[in-house]
Amino acid sequence: MPVIVTNESEHTLPDLIVSHNTDRNRDHPELGYRDHLLLYRVRSGLGQFPPDEETEGSVIAFIEGGRWIVNCDSCHSSVVAEPTDPVFICPSCGSGGKWREVIFPEPIRAEIETILLLRPGFRHSAPARNWNALGPGGRKPPESPDDLRRENLAHGDPVDHLPVDSVLVTPGEEVKE
């Protein structure tokens, strides 16, 4: 487990895909997810939240640089998402005054995180830890766990097990079909 040493003390932090509640690099880490959204909403001049039952549509969470992210479907601002509270209202534009449901890739979320954690990096410093919820170009199905395993193999990163239909080839060996 990586150890982070500061001037004051030694802290041991587990490596993980960061969500709002595990994000220690944000402003006001003491605030919960909704309180954090509310703080920025008020700062933007949007006032208090609408009631919880005022919902409209959904947005899809994805992983970028080792963090769960959700983009506003109106203004495209983004925030670190929280799987334990899968709702969103944009702190910049207000999302038309309605909450959005946040769609996480259940039941394969843990599998996706496990595969991405095999890639280099640690928490926020993990530029190769990405999962595209909309697939390449936003037109295909989401990247599957086996797609991520193939990417790991292609970049020389470990895999938890081989993807379906994969063939291991020794460098210089000819692939037979």
Image (cartoon, grey):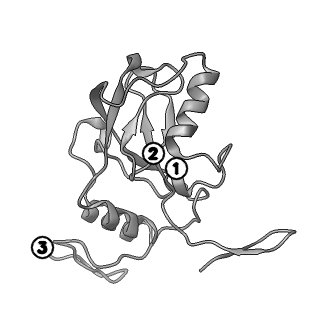
Who's the residue at 39% across and 64% down the image? 113
Residue 88 vertical placement versus 22 (above, below): above
User: Is 68 above or below relative to 149?
Assistant: above
As shown in the figure, which amino acid type bears the numbered disc 3?
Glu
> Do tag 2 and tag 1 residues touch (Cβ < 8 Å)?
yes
> Label 2 belongs to which residue?
81
The answer to whether one can see residue 65 in this image is: no
Mark 1: which amino acid?
His
Relative image position of residue 161 (x, y in whole percent):
29, 79
Q: Secondary structure at mark 1?
A: helix
In percent of width and height, residue 5 lies at 78, 73
Tell me the tag on residue 177: 3
Q: Quadrant of residue 114?
A: bottom left
Disc with the residue nearer the chain's start (1 vs 3): 1
Label placed on residue 20: 1
Q: Quadrant of the N terminus?
A: bottom right
Q: Residue at x 86, y 69 (%)?
A: 8
